[in-house]
Image: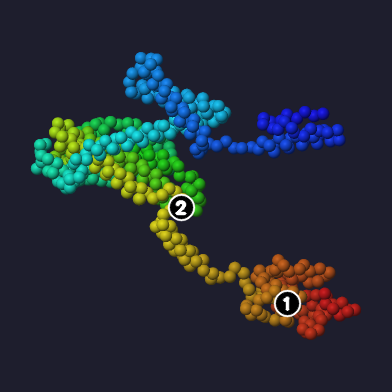
Amino acid sequence: MTVVDLEKGAPQDAPQDTPGTPVSAAAETSDAAAVAVLPDVPRRIGGVTRSGVLSVSGAAASGLCVAVLLFGELAPFSGALGFFVTAYLSFLGIYAVLTGLEEDGQAVRDRVMTVVLWSAGGLMFAALTLVVGFTAWRGREALPHANFFTQDMQAAGPLDPLTHGGIAHAMLGTLIMIAIALAITVPLGLACAVYLNQIPGRFSRFVRTIVEAMTALPSIVAGLMVYAVWILNLGMQKSGLAAGFAISVMMLPIVIRAADVVLRLVPGTLTEASEALGAPRWRTVWHVVLPTARSGLATAVILGTARGIGETSPVLLTAGFTAALNADPTNGPMVSLPLAVFNFVKSPEPTMIARGFGAAAVLMALVLILFVIARVIGGRGPGHQNKRQARRAARASRRDTTRFAELHTPGLELFETGPAEGDVGTERPESSAHTGPSEGDGHAERPGRGAGNGAPSPDAPAADNGEQSPEDNASAPADGPLQGPPAPDHEPRTGGAGGNTDPATGDAH
């Protein structure tokens, strides 16, 4: 009698071994039945289930009730922040207990961390929505007026209504300053990132350390440096060009650091394949590395732009302030949108405060527009092409195919198709190459193509029984005597170097 341990959930009426059934057969039958009843079911790691929804809803209600009891009845707690923190922690604990009733420890940890991540994402999205919505709501009084986008504040004062004055001078100043900063930052930042990625060494490690330290540089320090060097030492006046220099100092470490991280993600097999084909390092970087990381590099530029476009203190120190429109970045003070917002909202007049929030909303819209432009320029990720890029790649492939076909046009044959040197027999033209025996030839069989210079073909049979080999026949002089006259086409051959004749039957073999 063999006892078989059944898995949990297996039927208790499994077949037992009978007197006429062998013990091993009964055990195998029980094991097969247990396996058939309990198949392996993979655990779900995603998706929405009914039990999951009920667990989340019940845990949320229970956590809220616990917070109400603690803050209202049981404990002398107070404060809105403490109430929400207590409710959330209670929710997590109750949800873990409810999930543990159905799942194992690994599944419980997975569900709890999923809830935490979803909560963090929702909190960040809610904060962003609150900031954007509050800014747009407070600026709703100034945004509908067309003069707000086409006029400056030269002829408008704090007591003037919103139908007078605007932020055209601040918008133009922001665009000019950020254009100067991008013209300096993008080539220098990308070149430095390529250097850090492609040329490792002691100096590159030093440069990477300096870049990481500059990411935490206060903006006022960058403004003071440009103010001391450009304005005090060199005697230049405050202008948009000086503000562009200060903004570029703030943007440069952000672009370098982000671009360096993106270039590290380019597979090394791509660069190895390019260099294996003989491409120099600069061509590999220009045609392989940078196009592959183009989308990430556009994101790096956007991160640097978002950092520089919102700076106020460097612009205040280096560009000054003006209420008039100035389109010359090298002459006269210039104002930007962040600086205009700062000056508008510190006024006690409601119209000026509305102008300040309207300028802040325009600044956020400008950042969004720049982000969209960068996404269009950056394209899709590696391996994904839009229709325009696919058509361009197809045209390039057709041009390459035509060029390769012109370069590899067959001009010479690799093997000669005419008769080899040293052949004894009737000369054949080059166009009459074939694989069968030729008329008037002293050989029993001659391949259509030889290796040239009298060398035999690899497919030619070896000579035996004292016959003359093809090498000996080919090495004989062309005008030397033959061992036997060639036989006519209608009669069997009786001699020669190409075969033997049976005297009994007269057949050649």
Task: Name the spot of residue 21 as percent of width and height, x first.
Answer: 84, 36
Residue that carries the numbered disc 1 in the rendered image: 437
Identified at 22% across, 45% down, the residue is 176
State which quarter of the image contains the N terminus: top right
At a point 27% along the width and 43% down the height, the residue shown is: 365
Along the line of sight, the residue nearer the viewer: 253 or 18: 18
In three-dimensional space, the C-alpha distance between marks 2 and 1, rounded to whole angstroms, equals: 52 Å
In the rendered structure, find residue 279 and report the number of the disc placed on it. Answer: 2
Task: Judge left or right: residue 365 versus residue 162.
Answer: right
Give residue 65's position: percent from left, percent from top.
41, 23
**Quadrant position of the C terminus in the picture:** bottom right
Q: Amino acid at mark 1?
A: Pro
Is residue 195 something that shows in the picture? no
Does residue 40 sit above or below 295 in this rendering?
above
- Residue 326 spot, x, y in % from top left: 15, 45
SS for callout 2: loop
331 shown above or below 440: above
In this view, the residue in front, 415 or 470, is: 415
Residue 420 relative to residue 501: left or right:
left
Mark closest to the chain's N terminus, 2 or 1 = 2
Q: Is residue 454 visible?
A: yes
Front position in the image: 113 or 453? 113
Image spot of residue 358 (x, y percent): 21, 40
Residue sitting at x 36%, y 36%: 125
Label 2 CA crowd tier, 10 Å (few <14, some 14–19, many 20+)? some
Is residue 446 positioned above or below 289 on the image? below
Q: Amino acid at mark 2?
A: Ala
Task: Write down the quadrant of residue 205 in the picture.
Answer: top left
